[in-house]
Image (cartoon, rainbow, N blue to C red):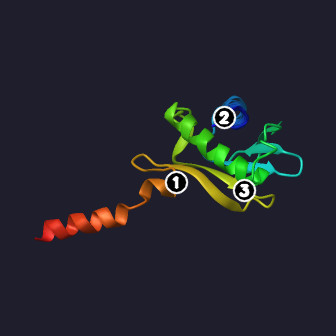
Amino acid sequence: MNSTNEQLITAIESAISEGLSRFETQHSVETLSDLYLYFDEENLDLIVHDDVENQLISVELDYFNGSSELSHEEEFLEAAKTATERLNKAGLFDKDYILKPFSVSLVDSDFIVSEELIFIDDETLKLNNSLLAGLDKELNDFLKELMK
């Protein structure tokens, strides 16, 4: 991972952390079940919204790798997935005001979810499809052995 990608991931982590901090401060008696990220590719802005579409924070992201073959949106998506995974491992989504199931999703300007970045339930954590690669075959093999 190059330093540009790392700066982008860090900026996304910081924006999500600050957004949650602002939610906690402004809505001390409310709960949160979803967090929405809107990436404005034209202006390179990340806007974080709570589950009722209130804007929590807006930050400019100028950390994109100009020589990358990926579009800014694709580069943002990869960085956002990494950022949400890191924040979850750090326990950021284990706050008392965050209800489970909880998700962080990428939305478009009409708040239509285009990508679920992370989904956390008390017993389930869905990060991405690569974790499930080959699981069907393993389960089928296991069942065949069990049935013998």
CA separation, marks 2 and 3? Answer: 17 Å
Residue at 35% x, 66% y is 136
Mark 2: amino acid: Glu
Q: Quadrant of residue 48?
A: top right
Q: Are marks 2 and 1 in contact (CB under 8 Å)?
A: no
Q: Which residue is mark 2?
A: 13
At mark 1, the secondary structure is loop
> Which mark's residue is nearer the viewer, 1 or 3?
1
In the picture shown, does residue 86 fall above or below 124? above
What's the residue at 53%, 44% (across, down)?
A: 99
Q: Is residue 119 above or below residue 133?
A: above
Question: Which of the marked residues, 2 or 3, is nearer the chain's N terminus?
Answer: 2
In the rendering, which numbered label is found on residue 128? Answer: 1
Residue sitting at x 62%, y 39%? 83
Measured from the top left, where is residue 32 in percent x and y?
Answer: 61, 43
The reply to whether callout 2 and callout 3 are in contact (CB within 8 Å) is no
Q: Residue 27 placed where, x, y %? A: 69, 35
Quadrant the N terminus occupies: top right
> Callout 2: helix, strand or loop?
helix
How far separated are the C-alphas under marks 2 and 1? 18 Å
Locate residue 20, reporting x and y percent: 66, 35
Residue in the foreground of this view, choosing between 24 and 129: 129
Q: Which residue is mark 3?
A: 107
Q: Nearer the viewer, mark 2 or mark 3?
A: 2
Q: Front-most of 29 and 145?
A: 145
Q: Is residue 117 above or below residue 56?
A: below
Q: Position of residue 90 (x, y in %)?
A: 52, 30
Q: Is residue 31 visible?
A: no
Question: Seen in the image, is 113 located left or right of residue 97?
Answer: right
Image height of 15 relative to 102, above or below: above
Mark 2 or mark 1, earlier in chain: 2
Q: Image quadrant for the C terminus?
A: bottom left
